[in-house]
Amino acid sequence: MKKVLLISIDSAIFLSSCVCHNLGLKAGLNVATLNGDDTDNFDARTSMFFGGFAELCLTNDFAIQPELLYSMQGAKYTQVDGFDGTLKLDYLNLPNNGKN
């Protein structure tokens, strides 16, 4: 029982000494386009992305930064038969970055 208590106290001290939690917002500009054989012309679609992130320190020298981003992408296109259109693709991205 003493060993379990000692290990629990040591773990709590270790984890509390290297804990950092940073939360933030992220936003920016997307310029996306597509390539393909079936269309004559793809033009870039300018849109935006936004979301949030959390920085979680695992040790004093290493942290992970998971993010949740909503991104609007796609392209404007013209096909051979003269049909014009806009392809709108909306993504929910979940990147996870390591930092030291």
Image (cartoon, rainbow, N blue to C red):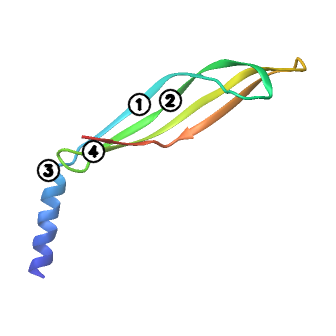
Direction bottom: furthest residue: 1
Type of the residue with mark 3 = Ser
Q: To which residue does mark 2 refer?
A: 50
The answer to whether the residues at label 3 and label 1 have Cβ atoms under 8 Å apart is no
Give residue 10's quadrant in the image: bottom left
Residue in the picture at 88% in, 17% down: 82
Measure the C-alpha gap from mark 3 to mark 2.
Answer: 32 Å
* Element on which disc 3 rests: helix
Label 2: few (<14), some (14–19) or many (≥20) C-alpha neighbours in 10 Å: some
Measure the C-alpha gap from mark 3 to mark 4.
Answer: 13 Å
User: Is 80 or 98 nearer to us in this picture?
Assistant: 80
Question: Looking at the picture, does residue 89 appear above or below residue 94?
Answer: above
Give residue 77's quadrant in the image: top right
For residue 30, side relative to residue 35 (left or right) = left
Type of the residue with mark 2 = Phe
Q: To which residue does mark 3 refer?
A: 17
Question: Looking at the picture, does residue 88 appear above or below residue 1?
Answer: above
Q: Earlier in the sequence, mark 4 or mark 1?
A: 1
* Element on which disc 4 rests: strand
Q: To which residue does mark 4 refer?
A: 63
The answer to whether the residues at label 2 and label 1 have Cβ atoms under 8 Å apart is yes
